[in-house]
Image (cartoon, helix red, strand yellow):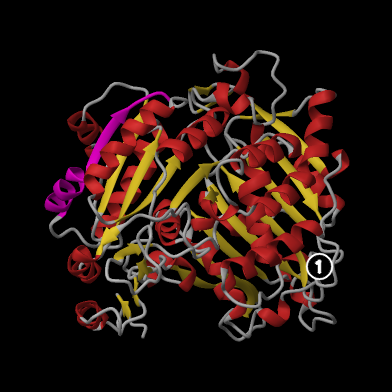
Amino acid sequence: MALSCMRCPAAAGAASARRAAAQPLATAAAVSFARCGGFGRSAAAAAACWRIHAVAPQGAKAPMDADVKHVVTPPTSPKVENGSPSEITLDDFEDLSALCKNDDSTVSITVVGASGDLAKKKIFPALFALYYEDCLPKHFTIFGYARSKMTDAELRNMVSKTLTCRIDKRENCSEKMEEFLKRCFYHSGQYDSEEHFLDLDKKLKQHEGFRVSNRLFYLSIPPNIFLDVVKCASKSASSVNGWTRVIVEKPFGRDSESSAALTRGLKQYLVEDQIFRIDHYLGKELVENLSVLRFSNLVFEPLWSRQYIRNVQLIFSEDFGTEGRGGYFDGYGIIRDIMQNHLLQILALFAMETPVSLEAEDIRNEKVKVLRSMKPLQLEDVVIGQYKSHTKGGTTYPGYTDDKTVPKDSVTPTFAAAGLFINNARWDGVPFLMKAGKALHTKRAEIRVQFRHVPGNLYKGSFGTDLDRATNELVIRVQPDEAIYLKINNKIPGLGMRLDRSNLNLHYAARYSKEIPDAYERLLLDAIEGERRLFIRSDELDAAWSLFTPLLKELEEKRIAPELYPYGSRGPVGAHYLAAKYNVRWGDLSAEHYKA
């Protein structure tokens, strides 16, 4: 006989399992006790089950001998990450089944590099937002880990300064903060010390008790110490009866070789399913809405090809410079920092074929196909720039090399524009233009889809010789002031026949009263639930680096000087010539852009 208890909507199983346990085990060949991921969003995110089975002591001839000892062990399911058997006697089964009813697992989240800016400004606030929205499991603990000496109280004080409640939902805010901070603790240790991670493991176990322990490590640290931390955490602080997962922040190497070396190093201690390479742009609301917009609206999917789309522009601009972070930035530059990851990931999502399903692997498979269909960038496909000092309105803004942390002879680009092509049947010949820069005239990230001219347009006389003015354009503004709008041609009311361009506008702030969650909230929740759709797989990373590595090596070996542009301008003039080479006009530089 076999009996299962599931902690899910089908849930009267715990009681029936208890009744089965009370029966003579001669009539119950096995009793299975399965635990479902109650707060998970997908089957892949559900945790493994537990089974009770009979084990014969030394010398016993059969499982049903009189002195059989009954234990509970985790199954050898491939879905258990870092799982290893642990024993609970049959006498404890009543307690175990009660635990199942009351959420029998706990999640321990360790923020490695807890004293850094990313942890303070993004990770802890995102975790609090998830707690505030009741998205975290019932039993959870947060530990900060860093080299800095700090007490639990000092960590809580540091974290409390960055926590805010939802603008649209402020009830019990201070009370929720207090409760959240009580779940936050701190452990000081070296990043390469197995002994210090073993001490962390002991503290985690104190909070986890006898529950199934699931552990998430967020590496908010420089990439040169990733492997030290992963090695120590894997050997000394992994879960023994649940899953262990690691979130790795970009940059994932500097080129193909260093990225591959990092992946090999991580896989000495982790399997691919345990590694969550985070790109926070994939967690942004408008990026996640890309597939919804395309695949659930008949009006767009038939147009999503070379037949109707003239070009696609992926634009990222910041209106500030490095501001003291030049030392870090100078080692990477704008191409590695923005284009190779953020913009290329958005491009892959935009251009992919319809996946078989919304499962993570199906989506990531299609993204990899897009990246493998692209040819590596050549020097003639790119324009690079670097901002210089500029005085405006009586205020002088410093140039990039004026930053004390940047070498005076640095040729690291703070601006880059590039033209890429996808060599497949859907996108053959369509230029995908990327542009990213610092110290520009505005702060914005957007996707602009410019459609082809209307063949034999009856109203072309109303637009003169500039047919670009009559081109339809779909704009997806990722940030700030999220919006989706479609530019159309429209008749101005009146007796004459005058046309203008109007916007069909979905402005998120006007349409939805709910505040848009931060990208880190979505990605942290996905990592806790085991949802990998918005994280980067190793072969995807290899394909992305293969596109940019030859260009980066040529730029650095030849020390090609970037074109200088004034702080607060629209970037180097060369970017306009690059677009003109592909018969394209940058959409974000037109007068209409500022009316949208």
Q: From the image, which quarter does the N terminus lie in?
A: bottom left
| Magenta run includes residue 486 | no
Dot 1 lies on which element?
loop
- Which is more toward the observer, 220 or 122? 220
Question: Where is residue 60, by image quadrant?
Answer: bottom left
Question: Circle 1 sits on which residue?
Answer: 427
The answer to which of 309 and 359 lies nearer the viewer is: 359
Where 15 sits versus 219, above or below? Answer: below
Q: Write the start and end of the magenta stretch as one range.
A: 173-190
Q: Residue at x 26, y 37 (%)?
A: 203
Whether residue 355 is situated above or below residue 419 in the rendered picture: below
Amino acid type shown at disc 1: Trp
Residue 511, how many percent across, how many down?
39, 72
What's the residue at 61%, 49% (across, down)? 342
Location of residue 384 in the rendering, given as x and y in whole percent from the top left corner: 75, 35
Does 10 appear above or below 105? below
Q: Is residue 132 left or right of residue 120?
A: left
Asked if residue 187 is among those painted magenta in the image, a careful observer would answer yes
